Image (cartoon, rainbow, N blue to C red):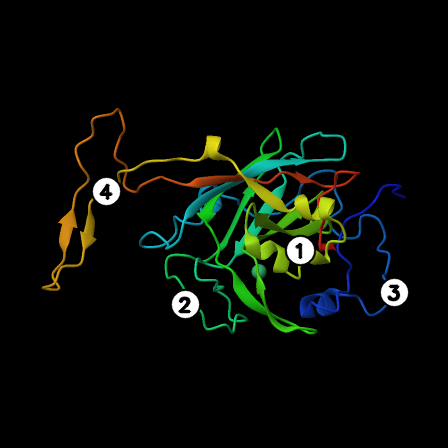
Amino acid sequence: MTNYLSFDPPYRDSNSSVSQLRMPERPLVQLPRGWLHHVSGPAFGQLKVRPGDSDLTAHGQGEPLGTRIIVHGRVTDSDGRPVRHSLIEIWQANAAGGYSDSLDVSGFPLDPNFIGAGRCLTDHDGHYRFVTIRPGPYPAFFRSTTHAWRASHIHFSLFGEAFDSRLVTQMYFEGDPLIRHDRMINAVPDERGQSRLIAQLDIDHSIAESFGPPRLHPTPDGVGGLVYPPPRTDPGVLTPRNPSALAYRFDIVLRGPGATPFESKA
Ligand SMILES: [Fe+2]
């Protein structure tokens, strides 16, 4: 039994239609220990997590639109120990606020170069790192207020010891003025809990490169013309794409007095 303050949002939030669906309607059933893949360490069966799965910008024919970002951090337990080799999955909207999901009825444009889902394993020290684009905000339907804006956010799922221990939460961006209007993060009952969901700009781990590969620009005759970067006068090396990305740091604490608020736990 915990004796510290939990900042998890309530299972049932009258503002959130999603929470109505996740709320169990019957008493929980206690499964016998070992009934569902209960083992002593992470166990993902035949699931192969490839290194490229953590770069959400690298799976199209071209670059996805939007600001490329690096999202990284460390997953720890209550005592600061790293959570090693844990599967983290993320999913998010594209830069226009649209999800590549048949359940998204917003009609916002889809980006053919961006699916919006990725995964990775934490390393030996609990670190993880994703490359993606900053998601756009989008309106969502809330029961008590009809339609309201969601701040830019990335959904996170973390697996614990096995598939029957899963934590789900959302990450927000430092300085986003929509955070104070977002019904989901404001369902977290305390500002201290809300602050644990806001990633901080990490300029030291950002990548700033002014020059990229040649790019086809439109011309009045419709043919287009290649525009080349200027010759380099510094030791920089041109790569097939401009690697620039803003970095955001998002550390996750699974439990204890500094625990990250989670919207659902299994
Ligand atoms: Fe979302």
Q: CA gap, disc 3 to disc 2?
A: 41 Å
What label does residue 146 carry, if any? none
Image x and y of residue 90, in percent: 56, 51
Image x and y of residue 60, in percent: 36, 54
Pointer 3 residue Cβ closer than 8 Å to ligand 1: no
**Figure quarter occupied by ligand 1:** bottom right
Q: Name the secondary structure under disc 4.
A: loop
User: Which residue, given by chain and number where applicable, does mark 3 sit on?
Assistant: 27
**Mark toward the viewer: 4 or 3:** 4
CB atoms of marks 2 and 4 within 8 Å? no
Q: Is residue 107 left or right of residue 258?
A: left
The vertical placement of 91 against 245, above or below, is below
- Is residue 49 visible to the viewer in this orientation of the structure? yes
Pointer 1 residue Cβ closer than 8 Å to ligand 1: no
N-term-proximal mark, 4 vs 3: 3
The vertical placement of 190 against 232, above or below, is below
Identity, as a three-letter code, of the amino acid under mark 3: Pro
Identity, as a three-letter code, of the amino acid under mark 2: Pro
The residue lying at 38 percent from left, 48 percent from top is: 58
What label does residue 109 carry, if any? 2
Q: Hey, which quadrant is residue 148 in on the image?
A: bottom right
**Mark toward the viewer: 1 or 3:** 1
Q: Is residue 153 left or right of residue 144?
A: left
